Image: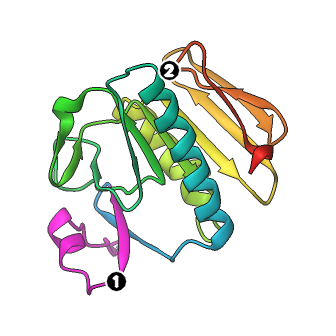
Amino acid sequence: MNALKQEPLYTVEDIYALPDGERAELIDGQIYYMAAPGRVHQKISMYLSREISSYIRDKDGKCEVYAAPFAVFLQDNDSNYVEPDISVICDTGKLDDKGCHGAPDWIIEIVSSGSTRMDYMIKLFKYRSAGVREYWIVDSEKKRIMVYNFEHDTMFEYHFDDCVPAGIYEDFSIKLSEI
């Protein structure tokens, strides 16, 4: 009988022990290394973060917006640590100096060449099961935004020239073609 070789399970401590400048995420004890984002990725991230922050400020909202690198500990364990491109947290009691402890209300991931499988599959499942209310996948190569509203169990596909409504806010939408 052949035994299957089991991969080691890692913890948040292993993430903290990475050499300076090396970034990785931890999902269910597995480490996923991350490459530095490109210019278009960063331009989209800055634009979205600015638009969301301005909306919240103008409405005197209590939610807070964080762009990567920002630690999110999805569950109350040491085997999950992610750095979403953008996190919107409305329950500020989840926040401390280390990051967010629990699921953000809204997460946006911007697809990079090496992150397609992570963003479309692994993180989609993980964010849904962790209690994220809304998840956007912004794909600049395909010029589309996939919007998953987990509260209402819906998924919509938009293009960069569409006004994309934010599900956690009734009167807010973003048009990426303005970048």
From this viewpoint, is residue 113 visible? no
Q: Is residue 13 magenta?
A: yes
Earlier-in-chain disc, 1 versus 2: 1
**Residue at x-position 37% and y-position 74%:** 23
Q: Position of residue 114 (x, y in %)?
A: 61, 71
Above-or-below relation of 80 to 152: below
Q: Residue furthest front?
A: 58
- The residues colored magenta run 1-27
Tell me the amino acid under the disc marked 2: Ile
Q: In terms of secondary structure, where does tag 2 sit?
A: loop
Q: Residue furthest bottom?
A: 19
Above-or-below relation of 119 to 144: below
Question: Which label sits on residue 168?
Answer: 2
Image quadrant assignment for residue 43 = bottom right
Magenta stretch secondary structure, dominant = loop
Q: Position of residue 26 (x, y in %)?
A: 32, 61
**Residue at x-position 34% and y-position 65%:** 30
**Residue at x-position 79% and y-position 60%:** 141
Question: Which label sits on residue 21?
Answer: 1
Color encoding of the figure: rainbow
Image side of residue 56 versus residue 149, left or right? left
From this viewpoint, is residue 134 visible? yes
Q: Position of residue 57 (x, y in %)?
A: 42, 29
> In this view of the protein, which residue sits in the foreground, 121 or 89?
89
Q: Is residue 22 magenta?
A: yes
User: Cα distance, mark 1 to mark 2?
Assistant: 34 Å
Q: In terms of secondary structure, where does tag 1 sit?
A: loop
The quarter of the image holding the N terminus is: bottom left
Image quadrant assignment for residue 38 = bottom right
**Residue at x-position 71% and y-position 41%:** 145
> In this view of the protein, which residue sits in the foreground, 20 or 52?
52
